[in-house]
Amino acid sequence: MDKKVQINRKRLIQRLDELAQIGALDGGGVSRLTFSDADKAGRDLTVSWMKALELTVHIDQVGNLIAVRPGEEDLPPVMLGSHVDTVTVAGRFDGSYGVLCALEVVQVLNENNIATRRPIAVVAFTNEEGVRYTPGMLGSMAYVGELSVSDARAIQGFDGSNFGEEMDRIGYAGSMEPGAIKPHAFVEIHIEQGPVLDQADLPVGVVHTITGITWLEVTITGTANHAGTTPINLRKDAGLAAAKLIEFLRDIATSIGGQQRATCGMIAFEPNAINVIPSKAVLTVDLRNSDGQALIAAEQRLQARAKELETSDGVTITIRDLEHVLPMKFDPLIVDAIGQSTKELNLPAHRMVSGAGHDAQLLAKMCPTAMIFVRSRDGISHNPAELSSPEDLEKGANVLLQTALNLANQD
Ligand SMILES: [Zn+2]
């Protein structure tokens, strides 16, 4: 077998450095919120790189960037990419790494005069992070037809801005209909944003499933009363019931086991005073599991516990659904293709679940899809301290390159 082509680590790192200078924050980190001036500058740089690689750049009506390298045949492309928007105080790898790896794949193919049967498309999806505009993963959602352009354009941001107006302002409202280019397959490479690979001392992972998520808001109503004069047995303490429910979340996670997660991340008491028994507690629950049945079971157990607490603690509890996202199992053929590339590069092909959401989970509804993860030091992300080593970044990019080559030459 002839020697495999390799990505250029130095050039990949240089591009990551260059993009990280746009929206750079004093004291480290970057901030490129969707359709901000920094996002525009980041997009401009990304598009300039796409054009320098002689790609045909399309912009769709929600601002997704799709750059196509022709194939030998006019077939649906293999799509590679991620996003270049960031959270408010971000690291330099989340999202950007996936787009820049895709560009690096194209550049290596160009330099080596390697033609592929299918075109290769590099994509940067709009508003993955969802900090300025909700929902997150907006661009990929529109791409697969789950959000209309008019609904997207009407979205009001947390800062009072309007999605459509801001997209027009920075000049990234394109003419292409979202999803007009339907891929043969989509592969997203991303930093893990969790500690699993770092703990296991593995450079890369093959992601076969994205976890399902249930978000609930629990409102517990009791009676406010004096903290000194009200005997313990006569209290309807919403705060205590909240504490019992939070502790029960850990019981749910440990008893179901596996990939089950259960978290209370927000709580508010009323009247919230040092000497008053809380009359009300509002808390949020985040349940996650890669197994949809187990996720439903977790929610049912929480509801049953809430019923028990109504009786034992004399409170009333209402549970409101905020969001339900089913687990997304990626296409086994694409997962295997990534696993095969990993083995060909003499890397361990560790199969894993993503505990975070990604554009790939939307694309999976449109075409066969899977993801490659690269180790994050200490599992830190959404933080200027986000770090993946140049060696790991290179390994991941080479897995993407081999996978793209294999898929782009498929029938
Ligand atoms: Zn991301």
Image (tube, grey):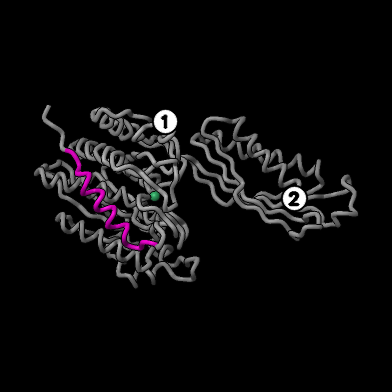
From this viewpoint, is residue 251 visible? yes
Q: Which badge, 2 or 1, comes first in the chain's sequence?
A: 1
Quadrant of the image for the C terminus?
top left
- Residue at label 2? 239
Image position of 17 with respect to 398: above or below: below
Residue 410, x across and y down, in percent = 20, 36
Q: Nearer the viewer, residue 387 or 109?
A: 387
Q: Indicate the quadrant containing the N terminus: top left, top right, bottom left or bottom right.
A: top left
Q: Which amino acid type is shown beneath numbered disc 2?
A: Gly
On the question of residue 33 being in view, the answer is no
Q: Within 10 Å of the Cα at label 2, are there few (<14), some (14-19), or many (20+) other Cα atoms?
A: many
CB of mark 1 near ligand 1 (< 8 Å): no
Judge from the rendering whether residue 100 lies leftward or rightward of residue 292; answer left or right: left
Residue at x 57%, y 42% (from the top left corner): 287
Residue, far left? 113
Q: In the picture shown, does residue 70 fall above or below 300?
A: below
* Extreme residue in the front direction: 27
Residue 200, disc: 1
Q: Decide whether residue 18 is among the magenta residues.
A: yes
Residue 201 within the magenta-colored segment of the rendering: no
Residue 101's spot in the image, x, y percent?
A: 26, 47
The residues bearing labels 2 and 1 have C-alpha atoms spaced at a distance of 39 Å
Provide the secondary structure element on which disc 1 rests: helix
Marker disc for residue 110: none
Region of the chain picked out in magenta, as a range: 6-25
Compared to residue 109, the image places residue 63 above or below, namely below
Q: Secondary structure at mark 2?
A: helix
- Of 142 and 38, nearer the camera is 38
Q: Percent from the top left, x then y, of residue 225?
A: 85, 57
